[in-house]
Image (cartoon, rainbow, N blue to C red):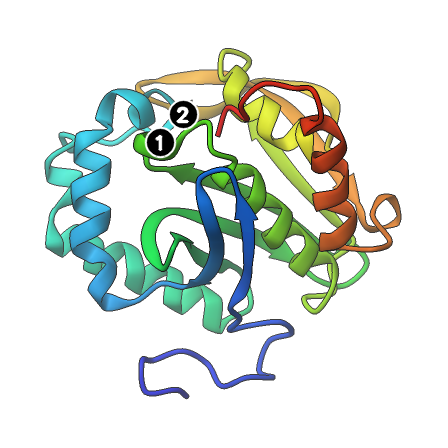
């Protein structure tokens, strides 16, 4: 066990890990595990960006402010740490120029014959349009297909969340289906689009994912995230 409470390298494939940096319009994007000291930035950004994040967040009996206290950060991080020790989740901070700017999680990890997971993310509204979330998805998914040893990664996104759909499409996710009343989000059971990618589609891993995005960026406008 490391000094910060993370499992020692090798206990679970590809975890813990630091990924990047990748240079995008907004700056240098990298991923790393959560730290106890991230709580203040997490609280500040998510409370400020309630209008942006809450429409896509899980339903809760707590108010937005009560969901983002220091106690809640401790609980949130503790749950993710415990799951990472069991090899069920890869909980990354998204950094921009070395500063906490959001989170990306590879979760629901299944081994055996399935070897799959889902990916979810959010970023600070002040850096939207700079390619931060797209770079983070490329780094996390490339790592999942590489050292982590997964075969399939999914993303489920509300039909109204066109910005997030653009992020996964930019790195090559395919839309595979329409899931009716799939998740309890913001007070109601919401339909979601199912996007997915398998390892065979990106044999070069992170480099292939970033190359696809680079091709799309030529002659295109700002990246939504």
- Between disc 1 and disc 2, the foreground one is 1
Contact between labelled residues 2 and 1, with CB atoms less than 8 Å apart: yes
Task: Give the x, y percent position of residue 205.
Answer: 77, 55
Judged from the image, the secondary structure of the residue bearing numbered disc 2 is: strand
Residue drawn 50% across the image and 24% down it? 224
Residue drawn 55% across the image and 26% down it? 223
Residue 172 is at least partly visible in this image: no
Q: Residue furthest top?
A: 160
Residue drawn 50% across the image and 11% down it? 160
To which quarter of the image does residue 213 belong? top right
**Which residue was labeled with disc 1?**
58
Height in image: 168 above or below 34? above
Judged from the image, the secondary structure of the residue bearing numbered disc 1 is: loop
Height in image: 156 above or below 120? above
Residue 162 is at least partly visible in this image: yes
Residue drawn 51% across the image and 59% down it? 89
Task: Give the x, y percent position of residue 194.
Answer: 66, 26
**Count of number-bearing discs:** 2
Height in image: 143 above or below 173? below
Query: Dot 2: few (<14), some (14–19), or many (≥20) neighbours within 10 Å?
Result: some
Gap between marks 1 and 2 measured at Cα? 6 Å
Q: Is residue 64 left or right of residue 123?
A: left
Task: Give the x, y percent position of residue 217.
Answer: 67, 28
Which sits earlier in the primary sequence, circle 1 or circle 2?
1
Q: Quadrant of the N terminus?
A: bottom left
Task: Give the x, y percent position of residue 186.
Answer: 32, 21
**Which residue was labeled with disc 2?**
184
Height in image: 187 above or below 70? above
Query: Dot 1: few (<14), some (14–19), or many (≥20) neighbours within 10 Å?
Result: few
Q: In the image, which disc is placed on residue 175? A: none
């Amino acid at each position: 066990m490391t000094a910060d409470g993370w499992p020692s390298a090798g206990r679970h494939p590809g975890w813990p890990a630091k990924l990047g940096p990748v240079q995008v319009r907004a700056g240098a994007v990298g991923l790393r595990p959560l730290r106890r000291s991230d709580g203040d930035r997490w609280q500040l950004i998510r409370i400020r960006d309630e209008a942006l994040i809450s429409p896509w967040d899980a339903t809760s009996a707590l108010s937005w402010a009560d969901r983002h206290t220091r106690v809640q950060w401790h609980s949130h991080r503790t749950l993710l740490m415990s799951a990472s020790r069991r090899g069920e989740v890869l909980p990354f901070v998204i950094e921009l120029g070395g500063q906490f700017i959001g989170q990306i999680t590879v979760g629901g990890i299944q081994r055996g014959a399935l070897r799959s997971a889902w990916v979810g993310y959010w970023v600070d509204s002040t850096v939207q349009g700079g390619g931060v979330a797209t770079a983070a998805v490329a780094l996390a998914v490339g790592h999942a297909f590489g050292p982590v040893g997964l075969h399939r990664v999914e993303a489920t996104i509300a039909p109204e969340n066109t910005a997030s759909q653009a992020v996964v499409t930019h790195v090559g996710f395919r839309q595979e289906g329409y899931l009716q009343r799939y998740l309890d989000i913001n007070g109601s059971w919401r339909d979601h689009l199912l996007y997915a990618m398998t390892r065979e589609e990106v044999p070069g891993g992170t480099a292939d994912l970033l190359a696809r995005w680079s091709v799309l960026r030529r002659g295109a406008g700002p990246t939504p995230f």
